[in-house]
Image (cartoon, grey):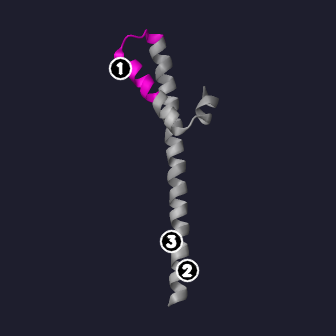
């Protein structure tokens, strides 16, 4: 399961997480099956959170690089 999560896109993981939550909210599952699905949901949530953090870091880096480039250009004009 862990290998599958690493290969899933963020959107796929989110879709699977929503499906698991819906199944759990129905309350029709036996306890053992509910626990297993809950564990899967937690793992997907952690994986998705990590993907979001990586995306945020990349955006921050790109914006910093752009700002740095703009600062250098502005410095040359003065």
Q: Which residue is mark 2?
A: 72
Element type where label 2 sits in the image: helix
Q: Are marks 2 and 3 in contact (CB under 8 Å)?
A: no
| Residue depicted at x 50% and y 24% | 39
Left/right of residue 49 with respect to residue 21 in the rendered view: right
Q: Is residue 65 above or below residue 10?
A: below
Q: Is residue 31 magenta?
A: yes
Work out which residue is located at the far right of the displayed protein and give it: 3
Neighbourhood count class around disc 2 (C-alpha, 10 Å): few under 14, some 14–19, many 20 upward: few
| Residue depicted at x 44% and y 23% | 20
Q: Is residue 30 magenta?
A: yes
Query: Which x, y percent locates residue 32?
Result: 48, 11
Q: Which residue is mark 1?
A: 25
Q: Which residue is mark 3?
A: 67
Work out which residue is located at the far left of the displayed protein and give it: 26
Q: Earlier in the sequence, mark 2 or mark 1?
A: 1
Neighbourhood count class around disc 3 (C-alpha, 10 Å): few under 14, some 14–19, many 20 upward: few
Q: CA distance from mark 2 to mark 1?
A: 54 Å
What span is in magenta?
Answer: 17-32
Q: CA distance from mark 2 to mark 3?
A: 9 Å
> In terms of depth relative to the viewer, which is nearer, 78 or 28?
78
Query: Which x, y percent locates residue 13?
Result: 51, 33
| Residue depicted at x 55% and y 49% | 54
Q: Assign the N terminus to one quadrant of the image.
A: top right
Displayed quadrant of residue 31: top left
């Amino acid at each position: 399961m862990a290998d599958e999560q690493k290969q899933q896109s963020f959107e796929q993981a989110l879709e699977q997480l929503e499906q698991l939550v819906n199944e759990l909210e129905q309350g029709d599952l036996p306890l053992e099956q509910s626990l297993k699905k809950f564990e899967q949901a937690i793992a997907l949530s952690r994986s998705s959170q990590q993907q979001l953090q990586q995306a945020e870091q990349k955006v921050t880096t790109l914006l910093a690089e752009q700002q740095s480039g703009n600062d250098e250009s502005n410095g040359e004009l003065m």
